[in-house]
Image (cartoon, grey):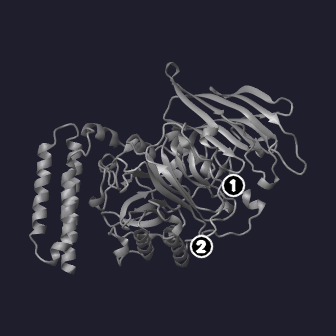
Amino acid sequence: MIFFNLIQFVLRTYCVEGVSYYKEYSDRLFENKPRMFDQKLLTIFSIISVTLIVSIDGAPKKILIPVATQLVNIATQGKTPISTPIQKTQKILSNPAKGTSTGYRKQSTGYHKSSDPLLQKTILSTLTKPKAPTYKAAVVEVNPVARGDTIEGVAKVTKQVVDIIESKDLNGVDIVVLPEGILNTANTAIPLPNSTLYCDDPNADAVLRKLSCAAQKAKKYVVINLYANEKDEHFSTHLYNMAIVFDRQGTVIAKYRKYHLFGERGVERPKVPDLTTFTTDFGVTFGVAICFDLMFANPMETLIAHGIKNFVYPTYWFSGLPYLSSAQYQQSWAYANNVNLLAANTNAPNIGCSGSGIYSGRSGALEVFVSLTPATKVLIADVPTNVSADHSGKMKPIKKLMANEKLSKSRSISTQDVANFGREDFSKYSMKFLDFSNNPIQTGEICIDDFCCEYSIEVSDLGQLKGKSSYSYAISVFHDLRHFKDKNTSKAGQDVCSLIACIKNSKENCGIMIPISKVHHRYNFKKIQLETKLPKTHMKVMPSTLSTDLQPFQANDFDFKLSEIKEANKYAASLSLNSPKQDLFTFAIFSRDYDRDSA
């Protein structure tokens, strides 16, 4: 048996990888030329290798059949799977700055070599027609029962996750997404085996076996995140922050390596972003991203440009007020891109981590959960396979969910814990504090250089309430580079035109929460209209809304418009309130200008 395993390894290495490399080379060589002759040579080479394998009798044939299957798959990948011309596809995929090639790890322009050609897929080949108008999705915000920085801790959290996957709470769910960073840490990274069905692999790490078996037992797609050690084709080991997707049989069908790292020392990132997709048996193709990736253009924008409208998103997001709390930014991103987003955040409120949801483009949050106390919560929603172009359809109210009793772990939490949410650095913001007590109607304009924010606001003043505190409000404008706490992180081009809550009329006192039990909503906002113009660059402009209980507004509570001013080479953006609001914390036009990003 050892001898036949050796034969299999040699054939995989020299036949399969050889065909794969040859195909990559020919793809670039024949980018704008007929490929008939090239494909014939590739097919002949594959037939010879497959014939050698098939000619072997007995048990060895069973061992080597997967190799033959890989060779056939690679040889038949020369034809473009749908009607998109090869020339057009190559043009899109060969420019790393604007978008790279894709699939499960393997990228057709050869940027990253896959160790398993059987799983290679292009974005274009995975797009299929959904089989039903909706699919049932779940995301789980997990408060881990232990830290995953020891072997014992990893075992405890793995059992917790397995119990969740196999829980009756997930009955009928098609796909479930779990958070980033709960299973382990970089110092307890798990080696990845060469197999894809970990449940049946005695050489696979116990964590991977148990999770694979849980997905198999539950018969649902499962998305997990962990730190993994992976060997490349030269047998060098690399540490990645990785999302792994299991299908209903517990087989690995996709892996994604986090590209935009945040303070993760010792963790590597790919040379270019993985453009990972996977297609389900209910006909929906998903893209994959992890946490900080959502702040940047790639890999998601490239996937969206190729028609991907559904994303799974494990995250360990440290909320920052008033613009970058977790659920707030998730909804803003899904709304601006008009895609479905299944976002699972780690629950650690003492360090500002909470906020998970299921979002459907312009319809906003189907389910959302934010907790200021430790809790584990399962969110389930029927997600439309065809994302609506607007929010004109019927919408149910956002559920302000409490912790699930069966899966929650509660303890007391102090006011100081709540104050640990991050806060924006307002030193480079221009602000105007609004005095509604003297004038319930406020209009004007604030500019930074040639970036201006026009506002028109009307309130009714409900007066002070004894024993309670009220927010004051300011127009807040930013047009600069945003700095992050992690000094190794790129500075982000950012533009903001906003109305935000403050506890006093000073920059240092804006974006700070008043404990919910102590707040009195003095001002009822009857009208808010914000308008701005932005230079036409590679950017994403989005509405950003937040209530004082840290939940995004319902999508039909506001109206967001973005249009192009061709003669001025600018965008015009406006955000208006559709219905009166008392619990307003943030109401903003928030733009990420990717062209201004710098190291």
* Count of residue discs: 2
User: Helix, strand, or loop for circle 1?
Assistant: loop
Where, by quadrant of the figure, is residue 475 drawn?
top right
Q: Farthest residue in the right direction?
A: 466
User: What residue appears at the point 50 percent right and 32 percent down from the top-left corner?
Assistant: 537
The reply, left or right, for residue 236 in relation to residue 35 is right
Q: Which residue is mark 2?
A: 146
Looking at the image, which is closer to me, 484 or 570? 570
Looking at the image, residue 295 lies above or below residue 195: above
Residue 293 x %, y %: 50, 50
Q: Which mark is residue 421?
A: 1
User: What residue appears at the point 18 percent right and 76 percent down from the top-left corner?
Assistant: 4
Q: Farthest residue in the top direction?
A: 567
Q: Which mark is residue 574?
A: none
Looking at the image, which is closer to me, 385 or 408? 385
- Marks 1 and 2 sit apart, C-alpha to C-alpha, by 22 Å
Neighbour tally class for label 2: few under 14, some 14-19, many 20 plus, Cα within 10 Å:
some
User: Helix, strand, or loop for circle 2?
Assistant: loop
Does the image show residue 298?
no
